[in-house]
Image (spheres, rainbow, N blue to C red):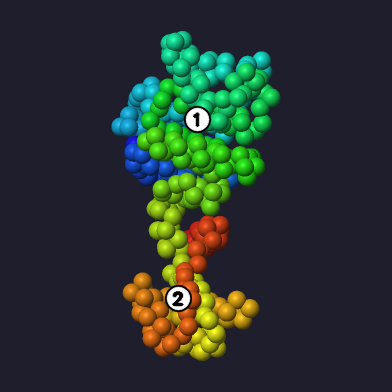
């Protein structure tokens, strides 16, 4: 479990983190989203005990990063947003080196390393020099390195950055597997939809402030007071259009003749939505489908940033 309490970090006159607080419950994947320079790496570095906070505190499984950094380090696996240079080391030697840093006995390492390589799909690369791996492979190796001491909490800083779509999918699959192993994971990215797919909960940081936290659907709901609903009808398109236009919770009705579809915005509750569909059917409209569009998450994120900017302009 991770708990961040009123964490503030100043670099000279710049406030990189401004009293942020949040919790990540045991066994959950927490996506930490923000634009470049928002304060993600600063937060994760403090959690990883690599950087002292200016004020506030953070706890990993109850241990304070300020007062018990050694204990914290035993609990965490940290994957930084850059991969160091390791000339002249083969993949298995690289993992062996890190395992030795954690005092894992040689005999155990011999069992552990093939297991880790299998987990990150690098079994066939054990004798390859690290520098010859592709970027995606290096990222996966770096992830394997964070797991050598079997930490319960993983801190992953942009693990999918710079990867092509296939390598991103591979990374996502590994993270899913780590979650199924019961790990608590905090993972950062500046790409909201990508994180949304793997996270149970999201925290959005902007200019050092946590501006929102919640499940993906909570964030979407907060952002849009209205839903977009698409209805397909088997003929009677104009009648359908008039019917929906007459509903007081419906706005902006658009018809698409080619698709036999009517699309509109709906401001009502779930119950009112059920009633609307019931009435449409009772009216005799030949409805073949009635569904709520998924709100594009990238759009949600951009709208959220605009809201923050508007608030700042008012202040
Ligand atoms: N060592 C440092 N000295 C001075 N300023 C710093 C330092 N490290 C970070 N900053 C500043 O603090 C702010 C937050 O940076 P941080 O690296 O935490 O953001 P980030 O969200 O991780 O961004 P990115 O996605 O680009 O990695 C930025 O304005 C950055 O320029």
Residue ID for mark 1: 119
Classify residue 73 by image quadrant.
Answer: top left
SS type, badge 1? helix
| Residue 272 numbered tag | none
Residue ID for mark 2: 266
197 to 79, vertically: above or below: below
Camera-nearest label, 1 or 2: 1
Q: Name the N-terminal-most of marks 1 and 2.
A: 1
Crowd around label 1: few <14 · some 14–19 · many ≥20 (10 Å):
some
SS type, badge 2? strand
The quadrant of the rendering that contains the N terminus is top left
Picture coordinates of residue 252, whole percent (x, y): 53, 80
Crowd around label 2: few <14 · some 14–19 · many ≥20 (10 Å):
many
198 to 9, vertically: above or below: below
203 to 78, vertically: above or below: below
Q: Nearer the viewer, residue 93 or 290?
A: 290
């Amino acid at each position: 479990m991770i708990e961040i309490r009123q964490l503030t970090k100043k670099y000279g006159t710049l406030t990189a983190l401004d009293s942020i607080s949040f919790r990540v419950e045991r066994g959950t994947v927490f996506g930490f989203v923000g634009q470049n320079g928002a304060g993600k790496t600063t937060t994760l570095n403090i959690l990883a005990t690599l950087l002292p906070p200016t004020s506030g505190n953070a706890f990993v499984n109850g241990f304070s990063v300020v007062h018990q950094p050694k204990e914290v380090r035993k609990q965490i696996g940290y994957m930084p947003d850059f991969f160091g240079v390791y000339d002249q080391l083969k993949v298995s030697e690289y993992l062996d080196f890190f395992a030795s840093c954690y005092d894992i006995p040689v005999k155990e390492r011999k069992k552990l390393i093939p297991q880790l390589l299998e987990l990150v799909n690098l079994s066939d690369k054990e004798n390859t020099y690290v520098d010859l791996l592709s970027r995606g492979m290096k990222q996966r190796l770096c992830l394997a390195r964070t797991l050598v001491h079997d930490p319960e909490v993983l801190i992953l800083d942009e693990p999918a950055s710079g990867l092509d779509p296939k390598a991103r999918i591979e990374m996502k699959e590994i993270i899913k597997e780590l979650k199924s192993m019961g790990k608590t994971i905090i993972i950062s990215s500046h790409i909201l939809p990508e994180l949304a797919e793997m996270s149970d909960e999201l925290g959005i940081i902007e200019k050092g402030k946590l501006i929102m936290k919640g499940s993906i659907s909570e964030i979407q709901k907060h952002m849009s007071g209205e839903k977009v609903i698409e209805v397909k009808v088997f003929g009677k398109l104009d009648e359908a259009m008039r019917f929906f236009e007459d509903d007081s919770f419906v706005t902006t009705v658009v018809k698409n003749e080619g698709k036999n579809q009517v699309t509109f915005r709906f401001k009502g509750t779930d119950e009112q939505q059920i009633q609307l569909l019931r009435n449409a059917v009772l009216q005799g409209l030949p409805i073949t489908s009635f569904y709520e569009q998924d709100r594009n998450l990238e759009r949600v994120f951009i709208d959220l940033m605009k809201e923050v900017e508007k608030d700042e302009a008012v202040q």
